[in-house]
Amino acid sequence: MEKKHRLELVGITYNQIESGVYALILQQAGGTRRIPIIIGFPEAQAIECKLQEVATPRPLTHDTMVTTLAAFGISLIEVNIRKLPNGVFAADLVFSNGQTEKIVDSRSSDAVALAIRVGAPIFTSDSVMREAGFDADNGPSENDEAATTGEERHAPEADKSDLARMSDAQLSAAMMKAAENENYEEAGRIKAELDRRKSKSDHA
């Protein structure tokens, strides 16, 4: 049986060359090898919303799925990232009802969005790690389009300075409005600024 590597979610990067394209960055647990997976804006929102713990007015699709599975006593045991012959990443979701296990095919982005909501481990095979991974210490290779063209989504200084000029009350109101409009990327960015201020005051 091929060796498996556990992966940890590093974050999401934004491709400034191609609008609406993001890269999900997964890193080998205890190592430096990373795998970039291209995802779309809705999938990036679903993952970022959970990472930033943004409270949404209504459950997102992945939240609803988690709740539904729990209602029927089904647990997500693990996620296994694989690569299809055409180069696209996919995933196997391993579910269990306590007695039997079932494997369900999934998009890799949906699999990660579910895994981070229930704390399920994410794995990939040794062959995928060798083929698609790059060493974070040495930087991405020229073939890693997702990594070479991506920049951290919440990095623009202009955006950060705009938030820095707003009061906590203004930020809270803006975050709620963004969530109501289902702009979870913006809500997550605002929440990160509020969390930064709270952490700073806690250590003052």
Image (cartoon, rainbow, N blue to C red):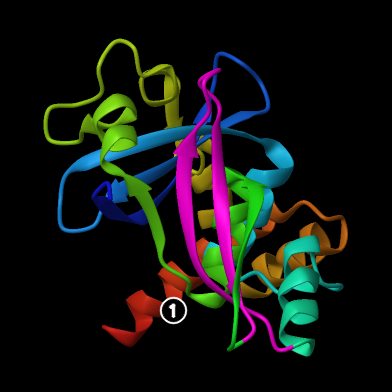
- Which residue is rendered at x = 65% and y = 49% of the image? 105
Residue 113 location, quadrant = bottom right
Viewer-nearest residue: 191 or 141: 141
Secondary structure, mark 1, is helix
Magenta highlight range: 73-97
- Which residue is rendered at x = 43% and y = 30% of the image? 151
Viewer-nearest residue: 137 or 105: 105
Viewer-nearest residue: 165 or 146: 146
Vertical relation: 137 (above or below) 11? above
User: Is residue 189 at least partly visible in the picture?
Assistant: no
Q: Is residue 84 magenta?
A: yes
Q: Which residue is mark 1?
A: 198
Where residue 116 appears, x then y in whole percent?
Answer: 52, 66
Quadrant that contains the C terminus: bottom left
- Which residue is rendered at x = 42% and y = 16% of the image? 145
Where residue 150 appears, x then y in whole percent?
Answer: 44, 26
Where residue 80 appears, x then y in whole percent?
Answer: 46, 53
User: Is residue 86 at least partly visible in the picture?
Assistant: yes
Where residue 139 appears, x then y in whole percent?
Answer: 19, 26
Instruction: Give the residue type that dot 1 points to.
Output: Lys
The residue carrying pointer 1 sits among few (fewer than 14), some (14 to 19) or many (20 or more) residues within 10 Å by Cα, namely few
Q: Main secondary structure of the magenta part?
A: strand
Residue 174 location, quadrant = bottom right
Q: Is residue 5 magenta?
A: no
Vertical relation: 54 (above or below) 30? below
- Which residue is rendered at x = 26% and y = 41% of the image? 126
Vertical relation: 141 (above or below) 147? above
Viewer-nearest residue: 81 or 3: 3
